[in-house]
Image: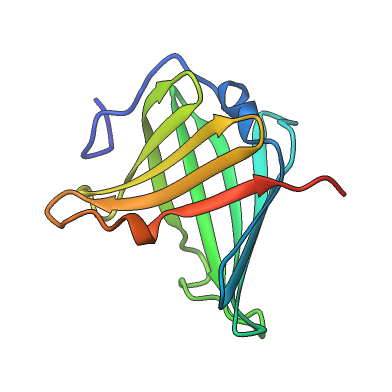
């Protein structure tokens, strides 16, 4: 019996998402975003995210993608600029991998089944991610566009 309200994709592992690996940055007039994805190790991928608005850190995220039985899960913990967690101590925002096509992954929010998180590698230099709420109009301004940063 599947313990998730949405049917998860079976037969995939975190290794199938290694295309996320890299140092990614994006910016516009008032914001800079960056996300670093480490290569798969120990059966997991790990990422750090930072969003700076008007020269000040708005928030941070720590992200993991890991195997949970036959499913692939993404877990996100949010932190304010003083590293105070948004979620309760033993909680995270949990997403279940529900679709994977080439270099696009779709995750369903376990606690909000009508919310989706999409990551897509558009080419070797461009990664996009966004949230999509099923019953709301999609706003293209809500797409995070990252370019590969070579340090």
Q: Which residue is most to the top? A: 11
4 or 135: nearer the viewer: 135
Q: Position of residue 137 (x, y in %)?
A: 16, 56
Task: Identify whether 38 is placed above or below 28.
Answer: above
Q: In which quarter of the view is residue 38 placed? A: top right
Q: Which residue is most to the left? A: 135
Task: Identify whether 47 is placed above or below 44.
Answer: below
- Coloration of the structure image: rainbow
Q: Position of residue 40 (x, y in %)?
A: 71, 31
Q: Which residue is most to the right? A: 151
50 or 122: nearer the viewer: 122
The residue located at (33%, 55%) in the rendering is: 140
Q: How many marks?
A: 0
18 or 44: nearer the viewer: 18
Whether residue 32 sits left or right of residue 7 in the image: it is: right
Whether residue 130 sits left or right of residue 63 in the image: it is: left
Task: Identify whether 147 is placed above or below 123.
Answer: below
The residue located at (57%, 73%) in the rendering is: 31
The residue located at (64%, 28%) in the rendering is: 18
Q: Position of residue 68 (x, y in %)?
A: 49, 32
Quarter of the picture containing the N terminus is top left
Q: Position of residue 33 (x, y in %)?
A: 61, 63
């Amino acid at each position: 019996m599947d313990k998730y309200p949405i049917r998860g994709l079976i037969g995939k592992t975190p290794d199938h998402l290694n295309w996320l690996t890299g140092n990614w940055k994006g910016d516009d007039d008032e914001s800079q975003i960056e996300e670093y994805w480490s290569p798969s190790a120990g059966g997991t991928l790990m990422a750090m995210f930072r969003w700076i608005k008007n020269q000040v850190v708005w928030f941070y995220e720590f992200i993991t993608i890991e195997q949970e039985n036959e499913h692939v899960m993404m877990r996100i913990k949010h932190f304010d600029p003083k590293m105070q967690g948004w979620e309760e101590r033993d909680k995270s925002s949990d997403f279940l991998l529900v679709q994977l096509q080439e270099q696009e992954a779709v995750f369903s929010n376990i606690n909000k089944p009508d919310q989706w998180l999409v990551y897509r590698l558009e080419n070797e230099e461009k990664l996009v991610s966004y949230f999509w709420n099923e019953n709301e109009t999609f706003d293209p301004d809500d797409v995070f566009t990252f370019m590969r940063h070579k340090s």
